[in-house]
Image (cartoon, rainbow, N blue to C red):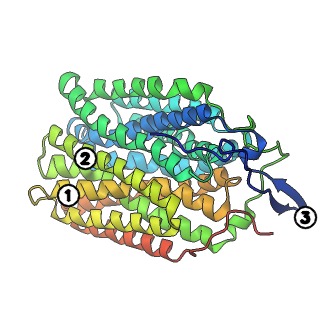
Amino acid sequence: MELPATEASLGGKYRQSTITAIHGQVRSETTDAAVTPVSRRWQIQVTITSFLALFAIVGIALYGLPFYYDYMVRELGFTRTQVTSGNALSKLIVGPLFGFFAGWFVDRFGPRKLMLGGIVMAGVALVGLGNMSTLSMFYFFYLLNALGYVCAGPLPNQVLLSRWFDKSRGKAMGIAYLGIGIGGALVAQLSALLARQYGWRMALTSLGVLIVVIAFPLALFVKESPSGTPTGLKPAASPEPIGWVLRSPRFYLLAIGSMCSIGAVGGANQHLKLLLGLDLHFTDQQVANVASLILISSLAGRLLMGWLADHFPKKYVMLLIYLIVAAGISLLFFASVPGLIYLFAVVFGIGLGGDYMIIPLMAGELFGVKVLGRLMGIVLTADGVAEAAAPMLVGRLRDELGTYGVAFIVLLILALVGSIAIGLLPKKTVDVRPG
């Protein structure tokens, strides 16, 4: 797919400088096009780098692990609450402790070094999970996997893409985020094949090695910004303060909306294999087919929502995505009806495809790119808490009640509350700090 031409390549028509007041001083900010002509070759490499990183860190590590939960329940005696609490506890610890620091690090030093460390940690974590035998080892390696996700997942890749693309940022983000859908679709089929041939432990170990092989090489050499500096602007003594962001009601509406929707998505995704495999007695291959259909549908969702975000107000695109997620979750009440699970997979997949991608686009439009690293560090930390707590709550309700009915009602309410919060955002947004 052809990447969009930049302002520089269209004749050097640079956007006018934006005057921003900081600490009583006036500073002129220029776009990356005004600093240096943006190379199409570097844009392509940046997009491929983010594609492969998201393919490995989110597609394989995040979406692949729930496929192995039922093996752990059967062979290691873990409960549903315990196998889903690994994700919960790791993100509840890692997110608050490292999320904002990771955002600050990206704003200050660029995303590359953080990505390299995160890729290695995620790979080691999956190898460890494939060889663990106790609950304490399970939690340790899940903590390491969560740290890899923070350091090499959406946060640094969102900032990397935002620095290289301006008007076509939604399209570029959509292309890179295809890696999540493709990785998730492939990992389900690959896991089913490897587990059948070599056992689930060797399958997980192989996935850990694959993560490093796929994501590490290009991330090692990626150029972090058009100017070669971490921000794409002249080096500053310190990053721009974000106190004004934290005082804005728009920030809290965005955070609450994304937390609720991501929590609903996480609750459904983390329990899908448990629901289908243990309750509805699907075979591993049938579960893999459903999971692959979800992630294939997410590809269409990412491309569609990325295009819509470039042509329509992002608030309405985000609201549409959140309502699609709610519609998908409502279909889980009828999962036992023959064939209906595949309709769920398509609807839920389309919503899933746009859900994570739209958050940085909306945040960038609301508050600008220069604070995006730290802002997304906060928002993604909050989202991680919701994404972690919701599956654990669903697991507890299922363990105590013997059915997923009440748990699915909770997830549906979460998705609808997220939609309401986004609906309250103003249509007209600003992308720079108010003077």
Mark 3 secondary-structure assignment: loop
Q: CA distance from mark 2 to mark 3?
A: 54 Å
Check disc 2 and report the residue beneath it: 293
Q: How far across and down, in percent of the image, does residue 244 sit?
A: 73, 67
The image shows residue 209, relative to residue 158, as above or below, that is above
Of all residues, the one furthest to the right in this rendering is 25
Q: How far across and down, in percent of the image, does residue 376 sit?
A: 60, 54
Mark 1 secondary-structure assignment: helix
In the foreground, 216 or 67 = 216
Q: Which amino acid does the dot numbered 2 rest on?
A: Leu
Relative to residue 266, is residue 147 drawn left or right? right
The C terminus: image quadrant: bottom right
Of all residues, the one furthest to the front in this rendering is 11
Q: Which amino acid does the dot numbered 1 rest on?
A: Leu
In the foreground, 359 or 67 = 359
Question: Can residue 234 be spotted in the picture?
Answer: yes
How many other residues sit within 10 Å of disc 1, few (<14), some (14-19) or many (≥20)?
some
Q: Which amino acid does the dot numbered 3 rest on?
A: Gly
Check disc 3 and report the residue beneath it: 24
The image shows residue 95, relative to residue 308, as above or below, that is above
Check disc 1 and report the residue beneath it: 343
The image shows residue 369, relative to residue 220, as above or below, that is below
Q: How far across and down, in percent of the image, does residue 350 sit?
A: 33, 56
Q: CA distance from mark 2 to mark 1?
A: 10 Å
How many other residues sit within 10 Å of disc 2, few (<14), some (14-19) or many (≥20)?
many
Relative to residue 8, is residue 90 drawn left or right? left
Q: Earlier in the sequence, mark 1 or mark 3?
A: 3
Q: Image quarter for residue 351?
A: bottom left
Mark 2 secondary-structure assignment: helix
Q: How far across and down, in percent of the image, does residue 252 sit?
A: 58, 69
